[in-house]
Amino acid sequence: MINVSHDSQRRRRAAIAAATVVLMGAAGALASTVEGARPLPPVDLAQIAGLVLLALVVGVRATTNFSLAKRDPAMDDELTQANRASASRAGFWAFLLSLAVALIASVFVDFRFVEITPVLIAVGAAGAGLRFAILEARGDG
Amino acid sequence: MAEPTLGVRLKEARVRAGLTQAELAELVSVSRKTINTVENGVFVPSTLLALKLAQALRRRVEDLFYLED
């Protein structure tokens, strides 16, 4: 059995979170240097970043046990794991269906990738978050 | 043929042992929600948890869980 201490696990998770943020920032910065790029106004960028960040937090909380703080292991028992698995499926299908809807809509409406992607991410995260909340609420009482 | 469902006598055994859901949850290292959902038949526990519950309540696992037709 692998025995990983809570501290090293926390450090590893913090490193993963930091690396993800750096990679996303680097990808954005690199994309802005491409010739012919059409940068968005800062207000739109802030809106999109806020929505995607919120969706990522909801998605991570609903589908993984990722946490930077120490948590009671009983709060990550098999019921919660089963609920997370179900929430992941719900999020996946919400994302896939909204992607299909966006694809069909793109035949009739002219919109940019940057306009629709944050919405798709938010729909997927909301689907997962909602499913997780409903399942967890079944245990109350 | 219809799939049999899991019958649960956990609540009965827990009450007889004089334990609350929270106390039993602590004994088997799960949340109270888990005990509640198992008792209500909402959540089917793993073999490991079923065995832990039986051990905590000093019962045989088949006394707590059985197949219903």
Image (tube, coloured by chain):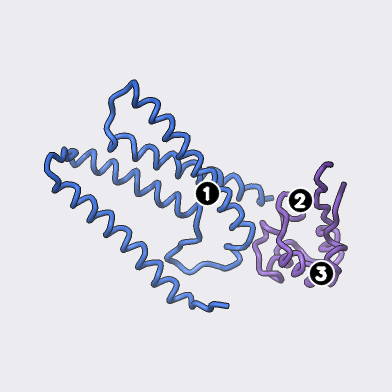
Chain colours: A blue, B purple
Q: Which residue is at the front of the view, A68 or A2?
A: A2
- Is residue A34 shown left or right of residue A92? left
Marked residue chain, label 3: B
Alpha-carbon span between mark 1 and mark 3: 34 Å
- Is residue B4 shown left or right of residue A32? right
Question: What kind of residue is marked 2?
Answer: Asn
Q: What kind of element bears circle 2?
A: loop
The residue where tag 1 is placed is A88
Q: What kind of element bears circle 1?
A: helix
Question: What kind of residue is marked 1?
Answer: Ser
Above or below: residue A87 compared with residue A108: below
- Is residue A9 shown left or right of residue B64? left
Image position, residue A39 (x, y; %): 17, 40
Of mark 2 and mark 3, the one earlier in the sequence is 2
Image position, residue B4 (x, y; %): 82, 48
Res A24 → quadrant? bottom left
Image position, residue B62 (x, y; %): 86, 63
The residue where tag 3 is placed is B57
* Front disc: 1 or 2: 1
- Is residue B45 shown left or right of residue A1? right
Q: Which residue is at the front of the view, A71 or A104?
A: A104
Other-residue count near label 2 (Cα within 10 Å), few / some / many at <14 / 14–19 / ≥20: some
Residue B40 is tagged as 2
Q: Are marks 1 and 2 in contact (CB under 8 Å)?
A: no
Other-residue count near label 3 (Cα within 10 Å), few / some / many at <14 / 14–19 / ≥20: many
